[in-house]
Every structure is written in C-alpha cells, then in structure tokens.
Image: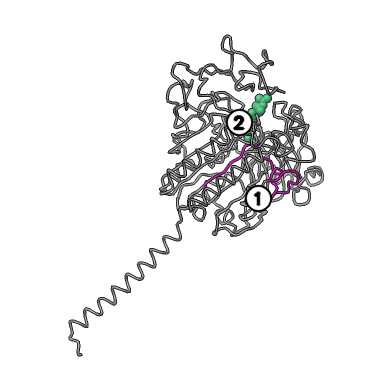
Amino acid sequence: MMRNKSTHFILIAIAILNLFTACNFKNRKKADTEIQKPNIVIIYTDDLGYGDVSAYGATEIQTPNIDKLAKNGVMFTDGHATSATCTPSRYGLLTGVYPWRNENAKILPGTAPLIIDTEQTTIPKMLRENGYHTGIVGKWHLGLGAGVVDWNKKIVPGPNDVGFDYSFIMAATQDRVPTVYIENGEVVGLDPNDPIEISYSKNFEGEPTGKDNPELTRMKWHHGHNNSIVNGIPRIGFMKGGEKAKWKDEEMADVFLKMAKQYVLSNKNEPFFLYYAMQQPHVPRTPNERFVGKSGMGPRGDVIVEADWCVGEFINFLEKEGLLENTLIIFSSDNGPVVNDGYFDDSVEKLGKHTPSGILRGGKYSLFEAGTRVPFFTYWKGKIQPKVSDALVCQLDIYASLAELVGSSDKTNDSKPMLDVFMGKSNSGREELILEATSRTALRQGNWIMIPPYKGSPLNKWVNIETGNSPEYQLYNLSDDVVQHKNLAGSNKEKLDEMIVTFKKLRGNNKDVTELELK
Ligand code: NG6
Ligand code: CA
C-alpha cells in the first residue's frame, strides 16, 4: 500500500520522538544511578578498642556479627576517631570540624549546654536537606540546653535542633546523671509529682552517695563515681527525683536496639539516616543476664559480646525488612579502650591474655595510637566488595564523604571527601591528620607521627594508660614501628622539623603550638 506524504511525516515524527524519549530515559537513568540515596546507618560503640574485635585479631573474645560486616566490607586498619575521648570525638564525627577548634569539646558533665551551634552544619542536617529522615538512638554526650536545664520541661536545644528529626538518647554517659532516656527533648516516663533535679556541684539533702553509703552499692567505685547511687551503682553527679523514669542499666542494650529498629520501621519508606550510638563497653558495664559470664572475661567482655549480639540482631532485622542491599553501614568506636575506668568490676582481674588495644600503644585518653585508632569499617551488601584497606581515614571525613554520596555541595574546611576510599575503590586516604587526646594534639603525616612535648605524667595511673606526655618531642615511623617504641626525634631532625612546621600551619594560632621550637 502506498503511503501518502502526511503518513510519512507522522512516521518520521514518531521516530524522532522515540529517539528523544529513549535518550531522555537514558539520561534520566544515568542521573539516577550517579546520585544514590541509600539509607545510611552509623553504628558507633563507646570505648571499643582496636584489639576488641576478632576481625581485628582478637583471639580471646569472639565478635562474629561485627566480624561478618568487617570481613564483607572495607575493613580499615588505620581508621581513626578524631579524639581519644567521647565528646570531642562525637563532635568531630557529626560536624566534620576538628574538635580542638571548639574549646568546649571536652568530656562534658550531664548538665553541660549543647556544644554544637544550632547554625552549624552537621551530617544529619546535610542529609535532611537532601531528602533524608534523620534519627539518633543512644548516647549523645554533646550537651543539652542553653544554660541551666529544667529536666521536667522540654529540653532544648538538643539533637533535634542540630539536624535530627527523631532522638532517643541518654544525655551524657551511662556513669553520669541524669540516668534517664530522653525522647525528642522529653524525659521518658517522667512523673510530674516526682520532678528531677540534677547538680554536678553538690548533693541534695538526705540523698545517699557512693562515698558515704557504700553499703547501698552493688558495684564499688575505684576512682570518681562516688556521687548519687542509681540502681545500686554510684555515678558521677547528683540526682534527686525521677524514680520511675530512671533507666535499668541491664536493659539498656535491649532498649536502644528496640528503638533503633522502631526508628527504621517508621521511616523505611524514605531514605533514612540512623546514628545508632551504643553504650558498650563504657562503664558501668552492665550486661543483660543473657550475657553474664558469656565471655569468661567479666563484665567488660560480656558487654562486648552483648554489643556484638545487638549488631547481629540489627543487621538481621534490616535483612528481613529487605533493606540491607540499600543501606550503607559505617561501624566505628568513639575512642580507644580502657580496662579500669573507675569501678571495681573485675575487668582487670579477668582480662587474662586479652589486649583491648591490640598491638598498639596507649588507649583511651592517650596520644599514642590506641587512643584514636579504632575498629572502623564500611559495609554495603552488593555494593562494597570485601577488602582490607590500610588507607589513613578519620571519622572527620564521613561528613564530606556522605555529602559526595548524596550529591550535596555542603563542605567544611576540615572534612575531606573520601567516598571512593570508603567504598573500597581507592586507597588514597589522608596525607595529614591532627589527632587529639584530652586537649593535646599530635600530627600524623603519611606513616609518621609527631607528638610535641607535653607537661604532665607519662602514665595516667588511675586507668593505667600511657598518656603520650613527654618533655621531649616524639617521632615515630609507623610503617616499621606501629608499636611506637623507637623515638626518632633525635636521629631524624629533618623530618621532625618538617612536621613541626606542618603542625603549626594546620593548628594555626594557638599558644601551645606557636611556642613550639624547631630542633
Ligand atoms: C571520665 C570518667 C570516666 C568516663 C570518662 C568519659 C572519672 C574518674 N572518670 O572523667 O569514667 O566517664 O570521663 O568517657 O570520673 S567518654 O568515653 O564519655 O569520654
Ligand atoms: Ca567513649
């Protein structure tokens, strides 16, 4: 059959249109795959050391669930927290800003005001602007309120004012009052007839304390931790009232796990970001009875086994919900390990051959490697190929890397975009990194670390950890001396001077630093 002119025209038009739609579809698909918005979960432990995880070489304790993620993801052997203590570390993680830039980023009492500026950009804020629902379940320890907090009213500002749509937290630490959960700024289970009062300076009349009433305690204090007694455990700080709202320590792991799952269930239909900040193995170590005696290493080992179980439960839950293939998981710890952190809890006596810091020197509070070098890995089923990476990475860089992932142009000066490293596609980690421990700083450059001279004892005798303090400069080459036993400051003055110059440049105008002299 002959076609007339107009039929021809129509056919050509349709063909052109088809071509356009095909191209368009192709383009659209490309854009969709370039910018991915997987769910993002940061699982953050408290004081878990480099040597506490069997994937990282622990032999005396087994962490099969954590190992499964580590071994099927990118397992970093040189991954760091920004600091060797909690508050500064969490500040660095969430804001992408070095904690030593904020003089308030030090271990905070439970009454401290919020130390993140509500105008400041944070991981949850950045993700929220990019279509994520954002939640935190677990330990906060970044301060609450703007001055004196009334715990009986809505507590603001807090996590919900720095980017989290949902929050279920403990204010500070498990060993600090207030010992209550706070959900979106409100104390959970508070009885208005039994208001909460908190003080870090003096006791409330008639209230027992660990110091004066040891007969009321079931866990004895070793150093600090002798103020108010809650559930038979003496704490840091004084608390009155709020009886019904007080948490039960042995249930905390289950409560946080339940709330983490609940958060996911409520928000699984949109991209979500969950910061699951577990309390283990920080003191007081209070395993649920299901885990008591399971490690053979006393409560510290038992709560690590408990934390490992929680990780397994949470991952199985994501799998069951069909979310695992679409969820990027980042696992790490806020600082290095400590064995005796203020209670007689058998952790020293029952440690046996276990070495929480692995082969590394130091631990929590220390400028030596074990202060900040912690278990650190990324896992994304089907997207990340198993790999052990020796790239130098820091939690500070999670901010910029997640920004890269979701296509955000948000930046901070300190956080370096390293998505390819976290995805296991590249090995080029950081060249330079400033590490912090109890307000002292050191410079890591390539495989070298330079620790400037610091006053103070070389050993924190309370916790039996080497601090890194020395009247002399320390310079170590970690490529053949990861244990930091050979101080090369005297023999390699050229490298030392080069590092002092870089350190001064990076740290900027700070008295401690500007007074440092070249050798
Ligand atoms: C210290 C506590 C320690 C722990 C730490 C904070 C004393 C003597 N020691 O001051 O037990 O609570 O603060 O730990 O009170 S962190 O992991 O939150 O940084
Ligand atoms: Ca900690």
Q: Is residue 390 visible?
A: yes
- The secondary structure making up most of the magenta span is loop
Residue count near mark 1 (Cα–Cα under 10 Å), binned few <14, some 14–19, many ≥20: some
Give the distance between the C-alpha atoms of the residues marked 1 and 2, in whole angstroms: 24 Å
Quadrant in which ligand 2 is drawn: top right
The kind of residue on which mark 2 rests is Glu
Label 1 C-beta lies within 8 Å of the nearest ligand 2 atom = no
Q: Quadrant of the N terminus?
A: bottom left
The answer to whether residue 267 is left or right of residue 430 is left
Question: In this view, which residue lies farthest toward the front?
Answer: 290
Q: Is residue 511 visible?
A: no
Mark 1 highlights which residue? 67
Query: In the depicted view, which residue is nearer to us: 314 or 148?
Result: 314
Disc 1 versus disc 2: nearer the observer: 2
Vertical relation: 295 (above or below) 216: below
Which residues are drawn in magenta? 41-62
Mark 2 highlights which residue? 250
Picture coordinates of residue 201 (x, y %)? 59, 16
Q: Dot 1: what SS?
A: helix
Q: Residue at x 72, y 28 (%)?
A: 345
